[in-house]
Amino acid sequence: MNILNPAYAGEDGKNELNMSFRKQSLALQDDPLTQTVSYSKSLKNNLGIGISLVNDKNYIRKQTDFGLDVSYTLLLNASTSFSFGMKVGGGIFSIDYRSLEIPNDPLFAENQSHFSPKIGFGGLLKGRRYYLQISTPNAIIDQFVKPAVDGLGNILSQGAKEKLHLYTGAGYRFTIHDNLDLTSSVFARFVSDSDTLIDVSVFADISRKIELGMTYRRNTSFIGTAMLKIIENTYFGYAYEAVTSDFSAVSNGTHEFLIRFRFP
């Protein structure tokens, strides 16, 4: 979670290393791929620190984002805490127009590459059984694709700019049995001039060794997840997203694999 919300860095005294691989299967050329690595560590004096790297490839577009997170946790009472985090980093965005081999078109004549600085913020309110969180991983609005012009100065394309992303979520954990907890949660993403993404999820934690979950993403998909404790402090996770929108005509679903190490 510290990739989206820096307040999670070192949260609850955990030291974690997460690595994931996500592949979206399409009936098109070059399936989108996303690889992530993140590490967070709890420090003294209620501080936490984290680092993350996200590498994303979609056809001729590549983007690599990296960030450093710092968090501070304020203990409100014996069972409630509020964490605030800040993220600093950057992103490298590139488009390989020349690989398309489209001749005599100035729009595709030169590849583009751009570095964007990033600054993000996040908050996390956590009780014994509930949590509330809000974040924006990047508050800098930057133009990462330059406008294309021809030799006469005519604008061929307007380029592209970053949009502000706001994430918020909440969850509550129910104890059904000594060896079974259920957590219900809702998660939302707000982006200017775009539809709001809303996830509604239910997760079952069985004996602290198996986690099973189901998520409904409004008007988009269903997602099934599983997390298994392989050996002490080592976990393996898998998620499958089945598309329910019109995009299902070209999508065969999305597979994601995750391995997590927790350190004392």
Image (cartoon, rainbow, N blue to C red):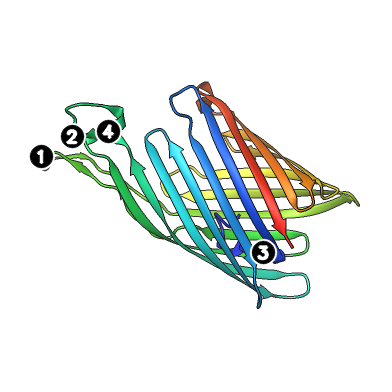
| In this rendering, position of residue 210 left or right of residue 17 | right
Crowd tier of the residue under label 2, counting other residues whose Cα lies within 10 Å: few below 14, some 14–19, many 20 or above: few
**Quarter placement of the C terminus:** bottom right
Q: Which residue is mark 3?
A: 11
The structure residue drawn at horizontal position 73% and vertical position 70%, both measured from the top left corner, is: 80
Label ID, residue 98: 4
Residue 209 in the image: state x and y as whole percent: 81, 47
Residue holding disc 2: 106
Q: Is residue 43 above or below residue 260?
A: below
Comparing labels 1 and 4, the label whose residue is closer to the camera: 4
Give the crowd class for mark 1: few <14, some 14-19, many >=20 residues within 10 Å.
few
Q: Is residue 131 left or right of residue 149?
A: right
- State the CA–CA distance, disc 1 to disc 2: 9 Å
Disc 4 and disc 2: Cα gap in Å?
Answer: 11 Å
The residues bearing labels 1 and 3 have C-alpha atoms spaced at a distance of: 54 Å
Q: Amino acid at mark 2?
A: Pro
Query: Going from the N terminus, do you reach mark 1 or mark 4 first?
Result: 4
Q: Are marks 4 and 2 in contact (CB under 8 Å)?
A: no
